[in-house]
Image (spheres, helix red, strand yellow):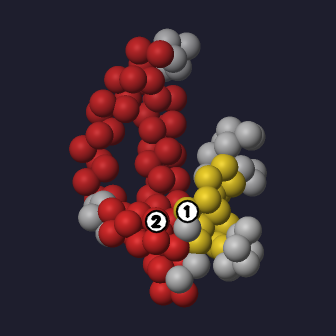
Amino acid sequence: MDDLGNPVIRTLGTRERDCCEYNPPTTCISILEALQHVDPSTWDAHVSSRCSLFRRHCSYMDAGEVSERVSQELAAAREVFAILLKAYEKAVEKEWGVSCEYSL
């Protein structure tokens, strides 16, 4: 429950321990509308750029490690995106808020 007694869906927000965010029901509607326009199948187009960033900032990693890391990140992002979308769909359906918290 939030501070007004409204139900809340809790989701993983960030790896930063002191970071959390609460999105009230009206904000959840806007977030869901934005998420519905995201197409994870287009994310492959960013793989090359992401690999370049790793090579630039993680020179200790060889090409195989970079490729594996980016592939893992992309797979995780797709998996988590589906969960995030469902959370906001459910929140809007039930008129709930969403709390994004550190929970690893």
The image shows residue 93 at horizontal and vertical percentages of 48, 86
Answer left or right for 45 relative to 3.
Answer: left
When asked about the image quadrant of residue 42, the answer is bottom left
The image shows residue 98 at horizontal and vertical percentages of 59, 67
Between residues 37 and 67, which one lies in front from this camera angle? 37
Q: Residue at x 71, y 50 (%)?
A: 102
Q: Residue at x 53, y 83 (%)?
A: 95
Between residues 18 and 26, which one lies in front from this camera angle? 26
Write down the residue under mark 2.
27
When asked about the image quadrant of residue 55, the answer is top left
Q: Identity of the amino acid at label 1?
A: Asn
The outermost residue toward the bottom is 94
Q: Residue at x 69, y 54 (%)?
A: 101
Answer left or right for 45 relative to 95.
Answer: left
Q: Residue at x 62, y 53 (%)?
A: 21
Q: Quadrant of the N terminus?
A: bottom right
Q: CA distance from mark 1 to mark 2?
A: 6 Å
Label 1 Cα neighbours within 10 Å, binned few <14 / some 14-19 / many ≥20: some
- Residue 43, labelled with which disc? none
Badges 1 and 2: C-beta atoms under 8 Å apart?
Answer: yes
In this view, 63 is above or below 100 = above
Q: Identity of the amino acid at label 2?
A: Thr
The image shows residue 41 at horizontal and vertical percentages of 29, 59
Q: Could one spot residue 87 in this view of the protein?
A: no
Write down the residue under mark 1.
23
Q: Secondary structure at mark 1?
A: strand
In this view, 54 is above or below 93 = above
Q: Could one spot residue 52 in this view of the protein?
A: yes
